[in-house]
């Protein structure tokens, strides 16, 4: 079998880029490149593994999502080390994050609509005026408890894939990755918003109640937008923490279990 650049490939099951990523991950964990060192250039890695640069970019995107390397396409990746607070994939994917904190993730599609994008959506997704988008509304649960409403706008190439997914699919991110849609970078905005009628109906809160909102635009390794999402969390279910260092900055999501109102140690805020 051949890669898209004609290189001979030997497949032993699983996605090729995942196997490349796994091999590089083991080398990083073994200290082969050292913390702060640089991986070989994309061309050198492609030659080493006998694959295309596109495959290498997908593998590097996986390592970047795991918090192991940094830098963008076109430059040599810097190794951040093996220490890990929370991976990019856990912040991007509700499913990955829920599993990382020992909860069972759930998801239920409430609606999926295909319609013309408005001006704001065209701006965020870099679409031409009049382009169509796919808009989803999903309820997300932790071990059966409603905690978040997810509103996501997808460009056509991604939305067409989402429309084919099962309505009860737990993770869209993981399934889209299997179709070659790689979530590589994201910009986050976190603030408060008042619950609307959909929030009230699905989360069981009062309309007008303050919810924690995270807005996110995600892009692929080439910098092309693949989603624009707005997530609304019930108060007290999640907190976000920013970690800064010279090497990198990271935003992490932290689960906040509901406090016991009868406990003398309960703190509020």
Image (cartoon, rainbow, N blue to C red):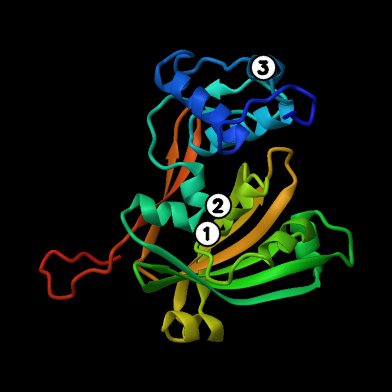
The nearer-to-camera label among 2 and 3 is 2
**Alpha carbon of mark 2 to alpha carbon of mark 3: how far?**
27 Å
Above or below, 235 against 38 in this view is below
Quadrant where the C terminus sits is bottom left
* Category of crowding for the residue at label 2, using alpha-carbon neighbours closer than 10 angstroms: few (below 14), some (14–19), many (at least 20): some
Residue most toward the left?
A: 264
Which residue, given by chain and number where applicable, does mark 1 sit on?
Answer: 171
Q: Name the foreground residue: 76 vs 193.
A: 76
**For numbered disc 3, what is the local secondary structure?**
loop
Residue 218: x percent and y percent? 64, 50
Examine the rendering and report whether any part of residue 196 can be seen.
Answer: no
Examine the rendering and report whether any part of residue 124 can be seen.
Answer: yes
Which residue, given by chain and number where applicable, does mark 2 sit on?
Answer: 174
The nearer-to-camera label among 3 and 1 is 1
Q: Earlier in the sequence, mark 3 or mark 1?
A: 3
Q: Is residue 130 found left or right of 152 in the rendered image?
A: right
């Amino acid at each position: 079998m051949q890669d898209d650049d004609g290189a001979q490939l030997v497949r032993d099951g699983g996605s090729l880029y995942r196997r490349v990523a796994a091999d590089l991950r083991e080398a990083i964990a073994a200290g082969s490149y050292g913390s702060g060192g640089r991986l070989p250039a994309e061309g050198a890695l492609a030659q080493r593994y006998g694959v295309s640069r596109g495959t290498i970019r997908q593998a590097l995107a996986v390592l970047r999502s795991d918090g192991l390397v940094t830098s963008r396409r076109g430059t040599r990746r810097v190794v951040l080390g093996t220490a890990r607070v929370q991976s990019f994939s856990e912040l991007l994917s509700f499913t990955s994050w829920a599993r990382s904190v020992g909860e069972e993730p759930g998801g239920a599609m409430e609606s999926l609509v295909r319609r013309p994008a408005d001006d704001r959506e065209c701006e965020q997704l870099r679409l031409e005026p009049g382009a169509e988008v796919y808009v989803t509304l999903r309820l997300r649960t932790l071990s059966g408890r409603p905690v978040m409403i997810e509103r996501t706008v997808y460009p056509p190439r991604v939305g067409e894939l989402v429309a084919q997914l099962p309505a009860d699919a737990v993770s869209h991110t993981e399934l889209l990755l299997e179709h070659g849609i790689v979530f590589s970078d994201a910009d986050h905005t976190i603030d408060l918003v008042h619950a609307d009628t959909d929030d009230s109906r699905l989360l069981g809160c009062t309309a007008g109640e303050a919810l924690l909102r995270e807005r996110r635009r995600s892009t692929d390794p080439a910098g092309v937008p693949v989603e624009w999402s707005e997530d609304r969390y019930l108060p007290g279910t999640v907190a976000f923490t920013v970690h800064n260092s010279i090497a990198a900055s990271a935003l992490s999501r932290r689960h906040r279990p509901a406090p016991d109102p009868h406990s003398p140690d309960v703190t509020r805020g």
